[in-house]
């Protein structure tokens, strides 16, 4: 009797977590760059009632072991790594990642990773995320100082830095920046008043061996963990990294029809486990009444 209660309670706990994950997925159906989570269940160790016996022909055949499971637990909570569909915004600082990888940003001295490409330029020209984290990449020489002196951008393994698109940026001939756009390779190209264009900077992307090992810290940000592997930083389009689509955002990959179906399954499983608790309690009361 006690075993059925413990098994049912473990089922209630596990399905409550499942409901929590589904609820979070539905809540983030419109969150930029959000990747839906799923729950993997695994059974707990079984309690063996009797061991297996070998056949002793011609007298007896073999017997299988007798065991009763002790419940269920959450084995893993994984993310659907399928990229969300791009959505056109027309904002030149917005970027959607097509393929693998994460944008790199630094906030309060901590290096963070995100697929949310809703970037903006702050009052001092810094390219930042929606939470104010400094987006990382490589700048063309002289870019941050306000005058581009060359058309080349440092490449990895050069260390990344914050990207600045200051008001009044000029090129070598003194023409001022009028607009900019982000290319598939992450290069931010500026259009100047003299009709020329020049690269201003290049956005960095990072990859890890095990994306499910990243630690989600909120605000669509992740940090590396001992099981994610170290972050390898490179330019968009390099081996193992996707490309960028400027003026677009990656939408959430949550499929609401799937989530609503999962919601019904989790609810039924939760209610079934509570029924086991109720039934076991009724049986125990009947046994107590017989004493």
Image (spheres, rainbow, N blue to C red):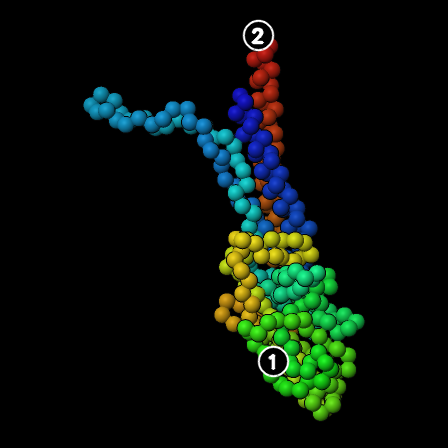
Residue identified by numbered label 2: 291
Q: Position of residue 200 (x, y in %)?
A: 66, 80
| Label 1 sits on residue | 153
Tag count: 2
Q: Residues within 10 Å of mark 1 (few under 14, many from 20)?
A: some
| Above or below: residue 143 compared with residue 58 | below
Residue 95: numbered disc: none
Check the picture and name the quadrant holding the C terminus: top right
Disc 2 is placed on an element classified as loop
Farthest residue toward the left? 58
Q: Position of residue 62 (x, y in %)?
A: 29, 26
Q: Is 4 placed left or right of 110 in the picture?
A: left
Residue at 60%, 42% (x, y): give it. 18
Q: Nearer the viewer, residue 105 or 184?
A: 105
Q: Please name whichever residue, 278 or 128, is drawn nearer the observer in this view of the structure.
A: 128
Kindly identify the residue that appears in the image at 58 percent across and 23 percent down.
Answer: 279
**First in sequence: mark 2 vs mark 1:** 1
Observer able to see residue 268: no
Q: How much space separates mark 2 and mark 1, taking CA atoms? A: 86 Å
Residue 198, picture quadrant: bottom right
Identity of the residue drawn at 63% across and 62% down: 111
> What residue do we see at 45% from left, 28% from top?
47
Residue 231 against residue 66 in the figure, above or below: below
Between circles 2 and 1, the one closer to the viewer is 1
């Amino acid at each position: 009797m006690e075993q059925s209660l413990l098994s049912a309670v473990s089922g209630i706990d596990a399905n409550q977590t499942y409901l929590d994950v589904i609820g979070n997925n539905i809540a983030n159906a419109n969150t930029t760059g959000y990747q839906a989570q799923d729950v993997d269940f695994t059974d707990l160790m079984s309690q063996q009632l009797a061991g297996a016996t070998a056949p002793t022909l011609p007298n007896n055949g073999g017997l299988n072991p007798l065991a009763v499971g002790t419940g269920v637990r959450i084995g893993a909570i994984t993310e659907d790594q399928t990229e969300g569909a791009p959505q056109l915004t027309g904002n030149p600082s917005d970027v959607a990642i097509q393929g693998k990888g994460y944008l790199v940003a630094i906030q309060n001295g901590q290096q963070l990773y995100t697929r949310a490409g809703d970037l903006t330029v702050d009052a001092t020209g810094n390219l930042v995320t929606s939470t104010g984290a400094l987006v990382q990449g490589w700048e063309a020489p002289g870019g941050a100082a306000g005058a581009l002196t060359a058309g080349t951008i440092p490449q990895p393994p050069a260390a990344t830095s914050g990207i600045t698109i200051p008001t009044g940026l000029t090129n070598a001939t003194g023409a001022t920046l009028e607009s900019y756009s982000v290319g598939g390779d992450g290069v931010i190209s500026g259009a100047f008043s003299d009709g020329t264009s020049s690269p201003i900077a290049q956005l960095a992307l990072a990859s890890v061996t095990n994306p499910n090992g990243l630690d989600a810290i909120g605000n669509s940000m992740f940090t590396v963990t001992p099981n994610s592997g170290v972050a390898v930083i490179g330019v968009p389009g390099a081996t193992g990294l996707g490309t960028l689509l400027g003026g677009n955002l990656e939408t959430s990959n949550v499929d609401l029809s799937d989530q609503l179906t999962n919601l019904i399954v989790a609810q039924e499983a939760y209610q079934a486990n509570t029924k086991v608790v109720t039934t076991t309690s009724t049986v125990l009361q009947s046994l107590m009444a017989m004493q």
